[in-house]
Image: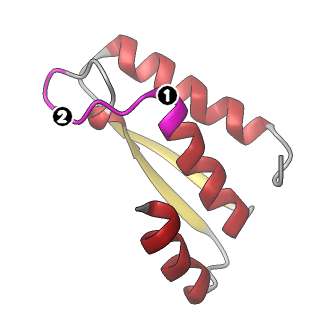
Amino acid sequence: MCETFFFPIIREFEPDLIIISAGFDSAKGDPLGGIGLSPIAYAWMTQGLRNIQPCLSVVLEGGYSLEALEVSSEAVFKTLKLHPKD
């Protein structure tokens, strides 16, 4: 859905900066979110946004499992350490 719906809309908008509100309550293992996204999914979404606009700001804002927060935020940070088009 991101690649076919959200990313094209964001590309059309041509943002100068993308701010990611990184709430990991949708992560696998979070007791409240119930969605179950993997760390790879967070990395993929981060890289997709970064391919649109390399100027990103990521702000941690939620999640209720320390383990899910750890592995998901680590995946995002590792993605940010890559070169923008890797």
Residue designated by label 2 = 33
Toward which corner of the image does residue 54 lie, by quadrant?
bottom right
**Which residue is found at the position 86% from the left and 46% from the top?**
83
Disc 1 crowd rating (10 Å Cα; few below 14, some 14-19, many 20+) is many
The label number, if any, that marks residue 50 in the structure image:
none
- SS for dot 2: loop
Query: Does residue 71 show up magenta in the picture?
Result: no
What amino acid type is highlighted by mark number 2? Gly
Q: Position of residue 49 (x, y in %)?
A: 60, 60
**Which residue is found at the position 50% from the left and 39% from the top?**
42
Main secondary-structure element of the magenta-colored stretch: loop
Q: Is residue 65 left or right of residue 68?
A: left
Residue designated by label 1 = 39
Sequence order check, earlier mark of 2 and 1: 2
Q: Position of residue 3 (x, y in %)?
A: 52, 64
The answer for how far apart the CA atoms under marks 2 and 1 are is 15 Å
- SS for dot 1: helix
Please tell me whether residue 7 is drawn above or below residue 15 in the rendered image.
above
Q: Write the start and end of the magenta stretch as one range.
A: 31-41
The quarter of the rendered structure image containing the N terminus is: bottom left
Of residue 60 and residue 84, the one placed in the foreground of this image is 84
- Callout 2–callout 1 Cβ contact below 8 Å: no
Q: Count all numbered tags in the image, as a single digit.
A: 2
